[in-house]
Amino acid sequence: MTALPPTVADRTEAELISTIQSHLQPPPDWVVVGIGDDAAVLEPARSRLEVLTVDALVEGVHFDRRFTPPEAIGHRALAVNLSDLAAMGAEPRCALLSMALPASLSLADFERLAAGFGQLAARHRLHLVGGNLTRTPGPMVIDVTVIGAAKRRGVLTRRGARPGDDVYVSGAIGGAAAGLRQLRSEGAGTTLTGPAERYLRPEPRVRLGTLLGRNRAASSCMDLSDGLADGAQQIARQSGVGMIIEAADIPIDAAARARFTADGDDPVLAAVTGGDDYELIFTVRPRLRGRLRTVGRQADTTITRIGVCTPGSAVVLRHGGQDAPMPRGYGHFR
Amino acid sequence: MTALPPTVADRTEAELISTIQSHLQPPPDWVVVGIGDDAAVLEPARSRLEVLTVDALVEGVHFDRRFTPPEAIGHRALAVNLSDLAAMGAEPRCALLSMALPASLSLADFERLAAGFGQLAARHRLHLVGGNLTRTPGPMVIDVTVIGAAKRRGVLTRRGARPGDDVYVSGAIGGAAAGLRQLRSEGAGTTLTGPAERYLRPEPRVRLGTLLGRNRAASSCMDLSDGLADGAQQIARQSGVGMIIEAADIPIDAAARARFTADGDDPVLAAVTGGDDYELIFTVRPRLRGRLRTVGRQADTTITRIGVCTPGSAVVLRHGGQDAPMPRGYGHFR
């Protein structure tokens, strides 16, 4: 007889919560009531607005356990939410973690998942103040709610772009989509290259987002969870502007470009329609370029101008001398 | 050929969000940025602490679509969270709704679910400010995060009970457990009696909870999501007291008592170990009975004294002249 490794079904909810807590920093004094009561109680941040967002990762939709290490699942579940806060210019404060777990999940994997979550949380001084654990007869579902704070004048939305504003993107794009291709075709056993790491452990642009907000440098901002094509179109639609995006100026991850080309795809189209990059797209009034340079010097990522906002509503990709409508983005639902 | 009814897979995420919004009240002016951006932005409530909680309903674990109408799923997903706020003495402010939906879910059922959520939200002046929709290859999962507000001195926790405090429970218990038995054995086609309605559409004790907090009448409080046996033991453990609960004084729903008796069960044991009642258990210093009477006159439910806190840590059920340890509660995880 072989002893099976213990699973989450061998533990009570209280024991699993203790496991999570062992990966957390001690709570700050603004947490009045933390984990363990009917709800968490917090002091609001002084003179700040509250910024709230929730995002879910579903096994088989947003990650594949065959090639996504448990630490990466925990990291990504939090990163996608931190990216939303960054897009609003908000500083992270706290999170709620709600997990539906299959009874077959090993305790070891559960602990690694908690470790991945805890490490990213500690790096951004974000405190887990509550959550929920339940079993599920289906795939794992991880829901994270994150609460941040921003000054009223530092809030970034998708609505402030005007014709003439320049369009920028942070970092390089396409890496996550290329990484997912690599993981799907080669599995997790291979030595991971940059793109696979980009997919598994995206780095939310929290510092850039808060700098853009605090310096009032951006007229609109959004994260690229569903790709650059989607981001450009969302900002254009919600701001009531058009855009011309210069394909040649888009910073495409070098390894991703090589992968897309080897696969016979147009690297620009593959990069702009690929999801999961968690970079920021934002617009800047031309007279505020000086402020943007200040932000750029303090940010931990590059910033690249990729186009301009125009009157009207057309979002155009200028590619190889031709203007074409920006393709549709990556849709998580359909 | 029969045309199949449309499902959620026939709509974009934006269209589904519009359907939800059609069941919501217009947002109040403290919602600075609502649904449709990377995150919601709110003005905090003045001179209040923030109270946050999240809870998930998983199809096949917390509800069975064969006998739970979609409106009831939407209602319960919110009600279980409002019950947690009530247990803290907090007034509801806003919610985030995150749903993982099977592609087979009909649009009609999706809309009924949104209607059930929206009706309960409107009754408690709670505003949906954001959320997430994703598909799932597994069972439906509905995660609701609720944010409320409470004055610092009005926050109720599980930790304040002292020996000598009286123990109270709101309403009547056992109804939801009996209702679930009825639904499981007879299905949804039957005429629903009180207990089935109690299970399907629990009424969170928001008014009672906020009155207890505002009047500083209770020394501890918790909701009965996992049953009275669990609630008594949690308050005892977290407050560092024991309890004697008088079985004869426990208000058991009359129809539930009849059902448990007909099934050959001890009605007291069935009622205290049954979950899903969403009543409140709370403790009151004897000298504050006058305040409690004031609360009782304004609350929309009955309040019954069922026991007393004692020194030590034993939680005792005094039943038919015998003292026995309180049975274990209903465990949602194991």
Image (cartoon, coloured by chain):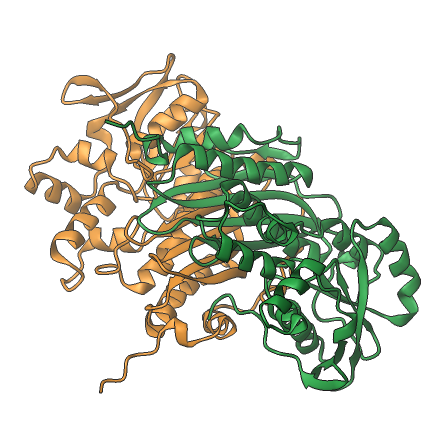
Chain colours: A orange, B green
Q: Residue at x 28, y 36 (%)?
A: A330
Q: Is residue B314 left or right of residue A56?
A: right
Foreground residue among B31 and B119: B119
Residue A137 point in image, percent of width and height: 36, 60
Q: Is residue A64 left or right of residue B48?
A: left
State which quadrant residue A153 falls in.
Answer: top right
Vertical placement of B32 versus A301: above or below? above
Looking at this rendering, what residue extends furthest in the top direction? A312
Q: Is residue A2 left or right of residue B294?
A: left
Q: Residue at x 32, y 16 (%)?
A: A314
Foreground residue among B22 and A39: B22
Would you say residue A52 is visible in this rendering?
no
Vertical placement of A304 versus A205: above or below? above
Residue A184 point in image, percent of width and height: 16, 52
Q: Residue at x 75, y 69 (%)?
A: B250
Residue B261 point in image, percent of width and height: 64, 68
Foreground residue among B101 and B317: B317
State which quadrant residue B222 falls in.
Answer: bottom right
Looking at this rendering, what residue extends furthest in the front direction? B262
- The count of marks equals 0
Foreground residue among A292 and B184: B184
Residue B53 point in image, percent of width and height: 58, 55
Would you say residue A331 is visible in this rendering?
yes
The N terminus of chain B is located in which quarter? top left
Vertical placement of A248 versus B143: above or below? above
